[in-house]
Image: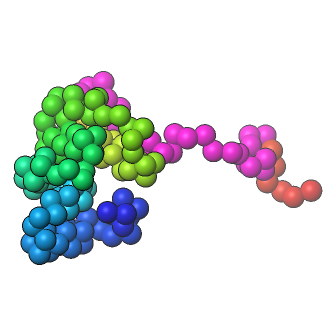
Amino acid sequence: YLALIHGAMLPSEVIHTQSKLIANHPDNVEFNATLMLADILAGQPKDALACLPALRISKRVTPMMKIALEGSARIVAGDTRTGTDLLEGVNWTEFKGQECSVFRRIQAKQIVVRPQRSPTVPSVVTDPDDALERPTHPSTEPGRSRATP
């Protein structure tokens, strides 16, 4: 899971690994949460949604994570209204910062992929993390020379 959210493993690699884990340990239904996220990130929302029945019975996956995964999968699958409604009910304070970043990127990518669905959506979307204020080095401020004194 950590390798997936930090980008250390490709979604396809995680799908392969998680599928083997689930086959070898069918009683550990919480493995479906990682598989579902990997499927979403790989652009396979139907496979992600197929994990829902097992995920719903897991007592080791938080209710907020279940909702976030389902909402994200539904958005990627094109069911934007249902997905958005689900995500509006998520308490994001229960998530780690990197998890929030991954879910924001999933949502932002859908705006880029489907700009024709809403004419009010800008055609270029920046990464939500890029919107954070970054300190400016004095030599890069407007009107300042890059030359050293």
Q: On screen, 63 above or below 53?
A: above
Q: Nearer the viewer, residue 128 or 73?
A: 73
| Residue 33 shows in this picture | yes
> Which segment is the magenta one?
117-143
Residue 22, percent across and down?
A: 13, 68
Residue 61, percent across and down?
A: 25, 50
Q: Nearer the viewer, residue 32 or 103?
A: 32
Task: Residue at 19%, 69% (x, y): give it.
Answer: 18
In the rendered view of the protein, which quadrant contains the N terminus? bottom left
- 124 in magenta: yes
Q: Nearer the viewer, residue 121 or 64?
A: 64
Name which quarter of the figure residue 91 lies in: top left
Residue 62, percent across and down?
A: 27, 46
Task: Residue at 20%, 50% (x, y): give it.
Answer: 59
Colour theme: rainbow
Task: Residue at 28%, 40% (x, y): give it.
Answer: 64
Name which quarter of the figure residue 76 lies in: top left
Q: Nearer the viewer, residue 1 or 94?
A: 94
